[in-house]
Amino acid sequence: MIQDNLHKIQAQMAPGVQLIAVSKTKPVEDLQQAYDAGQRIFGENKALEMRDKHQVLPSDIQWHFIGHLQTNKIKYIAPFVSLIHSIDSLNLLIAVNKEAVKNNRVIDCLLQFHIATEETKFGLDMAEAEALLSSPEFAQLHNIRIVGVMGMATNTDDKNLIRSEFSTLKQYHTRLADTFFAGHPEFKEISMGMSGDYPIAIEEGSTLVRVGSAIFGARNYNIPVNDV
């Protein structure tokens, strides 16, 4: 089932769009099936769960952290994480940079924007993002690299609203690219779209789609996770 689901979704990826298999709460056996079917990018939202899976799965997997990241958990993923999607404050970015220095790495990050109508979702607004990128503190962070933006649309059946929110994120990316990242071709990622809305996200310019249940089935809430 996982292989069939994965291949069906991979066939829908437009040129330049990468699929992140969101594997949170799933056992390593499921991830291995996806890996054997050719998937190499996996997304997790718990630092300790990601660390534990990284230790037992193939070393060429790219691990993307997609959840709300606590500063005291960065140390568990800093040695190997490929991309952190969920940077929503300068303090978090400073903390990531500190752990990156300890590991002699430069860690790629995305700025997370709040584009949904739901207040429960995390993220910056444009004024906060511009203030962050203009700050003298940011200028001193040499072990992180901002490579794009991320956002989550409202959980709704209203496709017009979803499309509008994704369009907004694309506009944010363009504005930041022109204002802060001219001459920086690495600032190219737009992480938007999940199992229920990724086709719309691709149409609106997504470069990274985060798909979980459409690949692995419903989330498993019963496996023990020691990441509290």
Image (cartoon, rainbow, N blue to C red):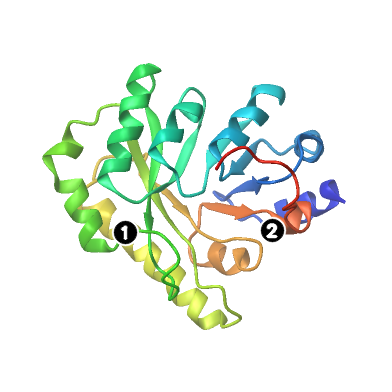
Can you say whether 166 is above or below 20 in the image?
below
Q: Quadrant of residue 90?
A: top left
Query: Which quarter of the rendered picture does the C terminus lie within?
Result: top right
Looking at the image, which residue is at 17% across and 53% down?
Answer: 131
Can you say whether 214 is above or below 87 in the image?
below
Q: Are marks 2 and 1 in contact (CB under 8 Å)?
A: no
Can you say whether 198 is above or below 67 in the image?
below
Q: Which mark is residue 134?
A: none
Q: Which residue was labeled with disc 2? A: 12
Mark 2 residue type: Gln
Looking at the image, which residue is at 80% across and 41% down?
Answer: 30
* Residue 98 located left or right of residue 4: left
Distance between the alpha carbons at the discs numbered 2 and 1: 30 Å
Can you say whether 225 is above or below 140 in the image?
below
Looking at the image, which residue is at 45% across and 64% down?
Answer: 121
The foreground one among 92 and 115 is 92
Query: Residue 34: image x %, image y %?
Result: 77, 40
Q: Nearer the viewer, mark 2 or mark 1?
A: 1
- Residue extending furthest left? 136
* Residue 194 located left or right of residue 79: right
The foreground one among 19 and 112 is 112
Query: Residue 117: image x %, image y %?
Result: 43, 76
Mark nearer the N terminus (2 vs 1): 2
Q: Residues within 10 Å of mark 2 (few under 14, many from 20)?
A: few
Q: Quadrant of residue 224?
A: top right
Q: Which residue was labeled with disc 1? A: 124
